[in-house]
Amino acid sequence: MSDTNKEGLFSKSNIKLITNPLNDDNPISVQVLGICSALAVTVQMKNAFVMSISVIAVIAIGNVIISLLRNYIPSRIRIIVQLVVAAALVILVDQILKAYAYDVSKQLSVFVGLIITNCILMGRFEAFALKNKPWPSFLDGLGNGLGYGFVLMVVAFFRELLGSGKIWGYPVLGDPIEKTGVYSMGYINNGLVILAPMALLMVGIFIWVQRGINKKLIEK
Amino acid sequence: MNTEGNGYTFLFSTVMVVLVATALAFAATALKPAQEANIKKEKMQYILSSFGMKEISRDDSPEAYKTYVTGELVLDNNGKEIGKEGFSIDLAKEKGKHPVFIAEKDGQKFYVFPVRGMGLWDAIWGYVAVDESLTVKGIVFDHKAETPGLGGDINTDFFEDRFMGEKIFDSDGTYHGLSVVKAYKGGDEKTDGQVDGLSGATLTCNGVTVMLVDGLKPYEQFLKSIKK
């Protein structure tokens, strides 16, 4: 594992901590963690974006805290300690959103609270932060959060476009009620894309495409 | 240091829980005023947009509320006035108290009635604005967790606009409230208080109907008394 005393802050192995989870070791499409929220909050890009930012914040800060405490945490209660850290951070994020980003917090509703149960968090705490120094842990948290956010944004892009004809809340395909744009040619929004089953299929398609491009991921 | 002993484990968990609890309690107390202000401003926004002032931003709403809302009343189940402080009443918690908001805009008087009910997944609520002829002049809905794109569309303009001009009483003066009907055949008929539903959202729309019919019922006597 990397050692910050001998290496620079952005040495090759440290940079890999950020870039790996984006593709080769993506938490959603390769490790298949955090699927539940990926299905729930990807109806609109804006929600997916705030959810991604929240997860990145919680996982990066949480990783640093766990890493700082790693030599003091009794191993018999380490899972509980990880849960307490995750829960405390998630409640903080939820409260801050309610105070300063009210509209978004209303739309995300329970899903912010459900970050606690996001397997990526516990996975990173247990697998990485407990064994590594704070700085690599921070980068690892950042990388995994970004990898999660990346998939969320891609899925949300297609779901919002095909399901409601919008991108980031802006109607790009015309008005479905007034029948302008592509709607005048008989195109209609696909209601199924809005529902959770289609999100699962979208994640599936994402995994398929990713493995088509990145041959390393194909299991023998 | 032995980090595996029972004593250390107890000490560690106790210290951790106390620290985390203190931090969270501090954060919750510090952020509470901002959160409550948001909820209050949002309620003002609902009331303002119910009589057509949809473009007011949340931060401007207290100012506009002061200008346009001229009075508040609280009615009991029989429509008798029991108080003046309507704004602070939470329909979800206080039963038997029905607030009325009286507003004036461009010389026209509006009465705004809050309603609250259940959608398919969670709470739905709305504000109904009527004029002195008991015609709906505007309505605003919102929901906590209805399906986006289906039941979630109850808070969109195109659905809310369907209620414009509907009557709460029929021509004989009998209360029928407002209702959402699946595959409505009445076209532009405004006296029946019925509007067309949203396809794919029948259960949410049924919830809206129940909310409107039951929610406006306590105001029946009051509505009759303001009719001109």
Image: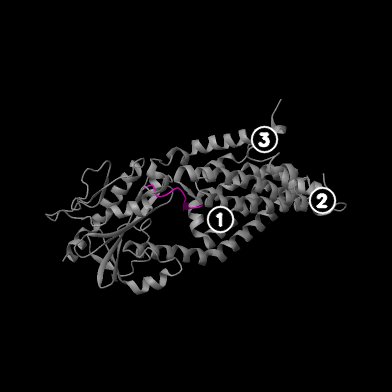
Disc 2 and disc 3 on one polypeptide chain: yes
* Residue A122 visible: yes
Asked whether the residues under the numbered discs 2 and 3 touch, taking CB atoms below 8 Å apart as contact, a structural biologist would say no
Disc 1 and disc 3 on one polypeptide chain: yes
Q: Amino acid at mark 2?
A: Ser
Q: Going by the image, does A216 lie left or right of B182?
A: right
Q: Amino acid at mark 3?
A: Ile
- What is the CA distance from the residue labelled 1 to the residue labelled 3? 37 Å
Percent from the top left, x then y, of residue B140? 34, 57
Q: Is the residue B208 above or below the residue B83 in the image?
A: above
Chain at numbered mark 2: A
What residue span does the magenta drawing correspond to?
A: A168-176
Disc 1 and disc 2 on one polypeptide chain: yes
Q: Going by the image, does A207 lie left or right of B52?
A: right
- What is the CA distance from the residue labelled 2 to the residue labelled 3? 27 Å
Q: Viewer-nearest of labels 1 and 2?
A: 2
Asked whether the residues under the numbered discs 1 and 3 touch, taking CB atoms below 8 Å apart as contact, a structural biologist would say no
Q: Amino acid at mark 1?
A: Asp
Percent from the top left, x then y, of residue A207? 62, 35
Q: Earlier in the sequence, mark 2 or mark 3?
A: 2
Q: Viewer-nearest of labels 2 and 3?
A: 3
Pointer 1: what residue? A94
Pointer 2: what residue? A11
Q: Is residue A98 magenta?
A: no
Q: Earlier in the sequence, mark 1 or mark 3?
A: 1
Pointer 3: what residue? A213
Q: How many numbered discs?
A: 3
The residue shown at (39%, 42%) is A185
Say which element carries label 2: loop
Asked whether the residues under the numbered discs 1 and 2 touch, taking CB atoms below 8 Å apart as contact, a structural biologist would say no
Question: Toward which corner of the image does residue A188 lie, by quadrant?
Answer: top left
